[in-house]
Image (spheres, rainbow, N blue to C red):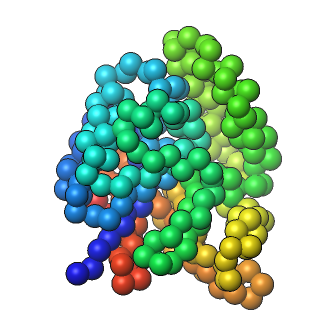
């Protein structure tokens, strides 16, 4: 029988997305115990300001994730909206957190580089500086010391800034991946790979299958869709090597 592993990202779940939350819960129920593994590659939550958040919708989502992880291997990578997912969340859910982004995984004997995708957008220099800073131990330690209400307030401000940026055409251009970003990732793993690995990532909200090459060796880049309105999507990797996007 053909087995499958599923990859998703950018669901941006929150209290304002009841339809998407319900869709996510239905899919978890459907897949639990039936698929080989589920990878959630970041921006699962529209915002995650810390594992102590008591928002009832976030708690409900966390509980559904926990129920799923009890039956099926679940791997979670942080995105640019939920990079404060921490050890407590991992312990609460039983999900395996992929701390490194990008990260090299093995799926049915084939290596893949998986990433949220924001690290590949190297033209956005200002964002990459913030990203480096905000992933440091010290920044996160200080952020977690701030009261929950304050962290929510800052998150809302950051969201407004990024939405204003996205509405500017020039900023939109620099918010896509670059060859440099992709090459950096391939080179990071070149010691353990004979050829460049296929890449799976989200973040850019431009689902597609691209072909690239490094040193004349081709590889594919699978971009995951974001979820919006009442529609979701994912990438399915079959144990026989087939890979396809699916609408949920
Ligand atoms: Mn993102």
Q: Give the quarter of the image for residue 147.
A: top right
In this orientation, which residue lies closer to the viewer: 242 or 12?
Answer: 242
In the rendered image of this protein, does residue 141 appear above or below residue 74? above
* Residue 174 in sight: yes
Left or right, residue 7 beside residue 33: right
Location of residue 81 with respect to 243 vertically, above or below: above
Q: Which residue is drawn at 29% across and 34% down?
A: 63
The x, y position of residue 108, in whole percent, is 42, 76
Where does the image place residue 198, in percent across and percent down from the top left? Answer: 57, 75
The picture quadrant where one finds residue 220 is bottom right
- For the residue pair 243 and 39, the one nearer the viewer reads as 39
- Quarter of the image with the N terminus is bottom left
Quarter of the image for residue 234 reads bottom left
Say which residue appears at 68% left-offset and 83% top-offset.
Answer: 194
Residue 170 is at least partly visible in this image = no
Residue toward you, 138 or 152: 138
């Amino acid at each position: 029988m053909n087995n499958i592993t599923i990859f998703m990202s950018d669901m941006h779940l929150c209290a304002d997305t009841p339809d998407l939350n319900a869709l996510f819960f239905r899919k978890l129920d459907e897949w639990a115990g039936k698929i080989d593994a589920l990878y959630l590659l970041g921006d699962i939550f529209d915002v995650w300001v810390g594992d102590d958040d008591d928002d009832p919708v976030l708690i409900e989502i966390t509980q559904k994730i926990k129920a799923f992880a009890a039956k099926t291997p679940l791997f979670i990578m942080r995105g640019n909206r939920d990079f404060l997912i921490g050890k407590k969340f991992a312990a609460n859910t039983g999900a395996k957190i992929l701390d490194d982004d990008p990260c090299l995984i093995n799926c049915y004997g084939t290596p893949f580089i998986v990433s949220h995708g924001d690290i590949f957008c190297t033209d956005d220099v200002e964002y990459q500086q913030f990203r480096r800073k905000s992933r440091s131990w010290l920044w996160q330690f200080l952020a977690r010391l701030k009261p929950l209400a304050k962290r929510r307030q800052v998150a809302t401000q950051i969201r407004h800034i990024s939405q204003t940026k996205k509405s500017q055409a020039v900023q939109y251009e620099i918010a896509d991946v670059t060859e440099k970003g992709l090459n950096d990732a391939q080179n990071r793993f070149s010691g353990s790979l004979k050829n460049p690995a296929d890449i799976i990532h989200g973040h850019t909200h431009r689902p597609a299958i691209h072909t690239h090459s490094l040193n004349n060796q081709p590889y594919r880049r699978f971009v995951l869709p974001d979820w919006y309105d009442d529609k979701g999507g994912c990438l399915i990797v079959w144990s026989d090597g087939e890979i396809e996007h699916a609408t949920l």
